[in-house]
Image (spheres, helix red, strand yellow):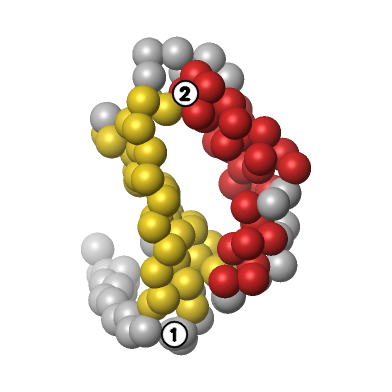
Amino acid sequence: MIAKTPSPPYYAVIFTNILTENTDGYQKMAERMVLLAEKQAGYLGHESVRDGLGITVSYWESLEAIKNWKAVSEHILAQELGKEKWYKFFKTRICLVERDYGFERESDQNA
């Protein structure tokens, strides 16, 4: 699902990763992080895919909102577990979205 974001400016956090062979508990933790992020002040939405390479882009109102999310205790635990056992590699990038545009096909009423 494509996140419905407001008009720019807003921020995007791009989290790219490759998992190790030990993924025990990873999916459950990832689902918990989504639930927690959705409750954070300043959270705007996210998009995530995994096909070998995992990419999650979360959208935020401000750098302060991103900083506050990074400091949530359960998120800190997830980060530590990721480094200890789940991730072979990861990189986080924080970007200011200055412009966005898109297209959405209307459903065909006659189909």
Determine whether 71 is above or below 90 in the image. Answer: below
Task: Using a 10 Å C-alpha cutoff, classify the residue at mark 1 as few (fewer than 14 neighbours), some (14 to 19) or many (20 or more).
Answer: few
The amino acid marked with disc number 2 is: Trp
Find residue 89 and name its label.
none
Find residue 8 and name its label.
1
Residue that carries the numbered disc 2 in the rendered image: 86
Q: For the residue labelled by badge 2, is the local secondary structure a helix, a strand or a loop? A: helix
User: In the image, what residue occupies the spot 35% across and 32% down?
Assistant: 89
Q: Could you tell me which quadrant the C terminus lies in?
A: bottom left
Give the left or right position of residue 103, taking residue 28 as reference.
left
Determine whether 78 is above or below 100 in the image. Answer: above
The amino acid marked with disc number 1 is: Pro
Q: For the residue labelled by badge 1, is the local secondary structure a helix, a strand or a loop? A: loop
Q: Could you tell me which quadrant the N terminus lies in?
A: bottom left
Q: Disc 1 vs disc 2: which is toward the camera?
A: 2
Residue 79 visible in the current orientation = yes
User: In the image, what residue occupies the spot 38% across and 13% down?
Assistant: 21
Give the left or right position of residue 36, taking residue 29 as reference.
right
Q: How many marks?
A: 2
Give the left or right position of residue 78, taking residue 14 as reference.
right
Using the rendered view, name the quadrant where residue 25 is placed.
top right
Q: Position of residue 60 (x, y in %)?
A: 55, 69
Task: Using a 10 Å C-alpha cutoff, classify the residue at mark 2 as few (fewer than 14 neighbours), some (14 to 19) or many (20 or more).
Answer: many
User: In the image, what residue occupies the spot 53% across and 62% down?
Assistant: 45
Q: CA distance from mark 1 to mark 2?
A: 34 Å
User: In the image, what residue occupies the spot 66% across and 40% down?
Assistant: 76
Q: Position of residue 43 (x, y in %)?
A: 61, 65
Using the rendered view, name the quadrant where residue 51 is placed.
top left
